[in-house]
Amino acid sequence: MRKGLNAAALGLLLAGCGAPPARLPGSHPGAVPPASPPAAAPDARGAAYRIDAAHSELRLLVYRAGAMAALGHDHVIVNRALEGWVRFSGDVAGAAFSLTLPTSGFVVDDEAARRQEGADFSEVIDADARAGTLRNMLGPAVLDAQAHPAITVRSVSIATATATAQAQAAGAAQAAGAAQATVRVSVAGHESSLIVPFTVDSSPGRLHAQVDLTVQQTRLGLTPFSVFLGALRVEDQLHVKLDLVAVQD
């Protein structure tokens, strides 16, 4: 049964506050024609930066749920094979970016990553279980990696985020570099428009952006795994952490 839970452990990426994707007649909820490969960096304002994969990482925390949750595992899934570009002129609101995550770059339950995430991930996962989870995750029921070998994230617009009402009431200053991006995300043939808050720091020739948000599988048109009338399931909400470094060549 653990392998059953693991089979749909990743119903993923970067939703939070976006609208559910449109449906095509007769298609799976959220299905759209496969997205085209990301275009090369446009001839837009600002200097060109490339994603530095050696210092960038997507990390996804996947949680079990239900009365029979003890039969499954919580997982840490990482991808350090990020590719893409950023255009930046010194004004965050004028920036643009495209990010590609090859599905071949996903690693399930890296021991060091699990230790970093604390008590929820203290259980030791053996090699066979890790391999089974990855195999199922890349299969047709989840990422369908053979048909869709990459996940893409493309910016539509970027704006400086406004302070929340709570922060304003407390008299707190907004974090330096806080912003939000409207993006198009394509996962396994599903395409969604999402709003993603992030922070960014810049220094000569280098950008460092971070995302930390909750993801909803159903916002991407995906159905969270569930058996035994929901007694064993994957939580709809996942936790996404993105640490992204871009550099000028």
Image (tube, rainbow, N blue to C red):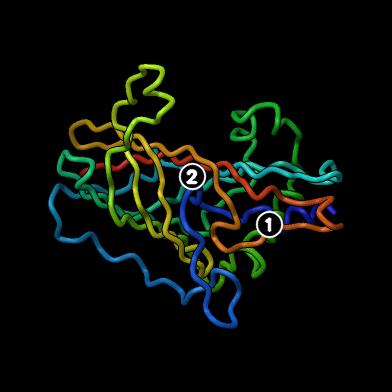
Q: Secondary structure at mark 2?
A: strand
Residue appearing at x 40%, y 29% in the figure? 165
- Which amino acid type is shown beneath numbered disc 2? Leu
Residue nearest the viewer, comparing 133 with 54: 133
Residue 11 appears in view: yes
Q: Mark 2 or mark 1, which has the lower sequence index?
A: 2
Q: Which mark is residue 193?
A: none
Instruction: Estimate the x, y position of residue 118 in percent, counting from the top left.
Output: 65, 27
Instruction: Estimate the x, y position of residue 127 in percent, counting from the top left.
Output: 73, 47
According to the picture, the residue beneath numbered tag 1 turns out to be 224
- Which amino acid type is shown beneath numbered disc 1? Pro
Residue appearing at x 75%, y 41% in the figure? 125
Residue appearing at x 14%, y 60% in the figure? 43
According to the picture, the residue beneath numbered tag 2 turns out to be 58
Left or right? Give the position of 194 relative to 76: left
Image-quadrant location for residue 1:
bottom right
Vertical placement of residue 39 versus 172, above or below: below
